[in-house]
Image: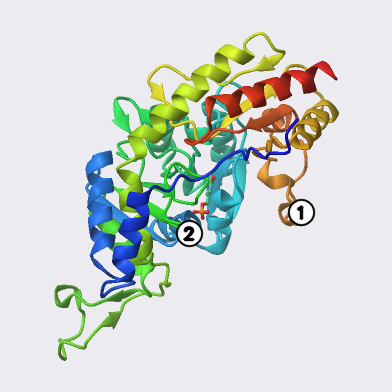
Amino acid sequence: MATQHIPYGRQNISEEDIRAVVKVLRGDWLTQGPHLESFERAVGDYCGTPHVLTIANATAGLHIACLALGVGPGDLVWTSANSFVASSNCALYCGAEVDFVDIDLQTYNMSVAALEEKLEAAKAKGRLPKVVIPVHFAGHSCDMKAIFALSKKYGFAIIEDASHALGAEYDQRKVGYGQYSDIVIFSLHPVKMITSGEGGLMLTRNPQLHHKMKLLRTHGITRNPAEMRSPDEGAWFFEQQMLGYNYRMTDIQAALGESQLKRLEDFVVRRRQLVDQYNTRLAALPLELPTEISGVKSSYHLYVVRLKNGTPEARRKVFDEMRAQGILVNVHYAPIYWQPYYQTMGFKQGLCPQAEAYYNSALTLPLFYGLSDSDQEQVVLALKKALEKL
Ligand SMILES: *Cc1c(COP(=O)(O)O)cnc(C)c1O
């Protein structure tokens, strides 16, 4: 077989994207320029959300979202066991404690039943979470209506980690609309749905949260005289009102993100077409294929299959075999609490059995806008071959 490499994900940059970036480089503002606001407005229009803020990356966005919701020492934040470490690290940055909710084996998202059971137990112990962070794994929205209903019953706030789900839909709306949460975070890392290099977005329907996140994004500083607590001393005057960060996106990045956003619908259409082709071509193999719950339209950031009755050793063999053939398959994710850092905090294996069973059999196949039909066919053939060798 030819020694070519097919990655699991890849950005797609057009000449128009490049022109948009170069235009900024030739202009007056590299940071704090006009594209930040126009990109925010474009995302707001796309998602139907009144308040949008660009941010340096989704991790910074999750951090600021936790702070805006008042997360601090003594608080508890829960997220899905099946996610990238940033989903829980954000709460640790605030000095809070974290815990993990198990997943369901249909969507690989936070299980509503497991969440409810854990909430009941936490209530009995008087130790309920302040914030829950559902993660729309692979671009498939969590059951937000059910999680929102639980938030009312048990009194927690919700941050959607929608890093995978820009372009996805839930309950007739784009993910990001935010009718069932306080804050929604998107990532614009190159492997995600669209990119700005590094970058992220914070969306909310709540003007107070928007105001607080805007301050936290830039040192806790305001330059708006209407918001000042002391008398205005002149046009140079600014006030630091809380301890914030420099988590800003550059205008260069915003121009790229804005240009990419225009292509998002095309990206989603092509990803979904590739998913249909995978589903057809892999149907007869001993694999669990991804499913879509009714009322959800996934953005398909990832295409994850699971080996039926697969052991970790079998998954490893298939993984190594495909990598040897230049197919750069991946695995998303080992349960966060399996990470050595989390083990030092006292987390033990066995905490979330479904997330662990999922991890042991999961394999992420290449899926991205620029994947050609013929490269996809190579992936299918390599997977068939690897499974036959088991
Ligand atoms: C990528 C990702 C993040 C972090 O995004 P960055 O923009 O790289 O900081 C957070 N959560 C999930 C689920 C992700 O996949």
Along the line of sight, the residue nearer the viewer: 135 or 376: 376
Q: Looking at this rendering, what residue extends furthest in the top direction? A: 284
Where residue 312 sits, quadrant-wise, is top right
Q: CA distance from mark 1 to mark 2?
A: 21 Å
Report the number of discs. Answer: 2
Q: Which residue is mark 2?
A: 63
- The label on residue 94 is none
Where residue 79 sits, quadrant-wise, is top right
Q: Is residue 188 left or right of residue 306?
A: left
Q: Amino acid at mark 2?
A: His
Q: Amino acid at mark 1?
A: Pro
Callout 2: CB less than 8 Å from ligand 1? no
Judge whether residue 205 can be spotted in this image. no
Q: Looking at this rendering, what residue extends furthest in the front direction? A: 2
Where is residue 35 shown, x and y percent of the image? 26, 61
Precedes in sequence: disc 1 or disc 2: 2
Identify whether 190 is placed above or below 306.
below
Where is residue 285 shown, x and y percent of the image? 70, 12
Which quadrant is home to the C terminus?
Answer: top right
At 66% from the left edge and 25% from the top edge, which residue is drawn?
378
Q: Which residue is mark 1?
A: 340
Which quadrant is home to the N terminus?
Answer: top right
Element under disc 2 = helix
Along the line of sight, the residue nearer the viewer: 14 or 348: 14
Q: Is residue 342 left or right of residue 66?
A: right
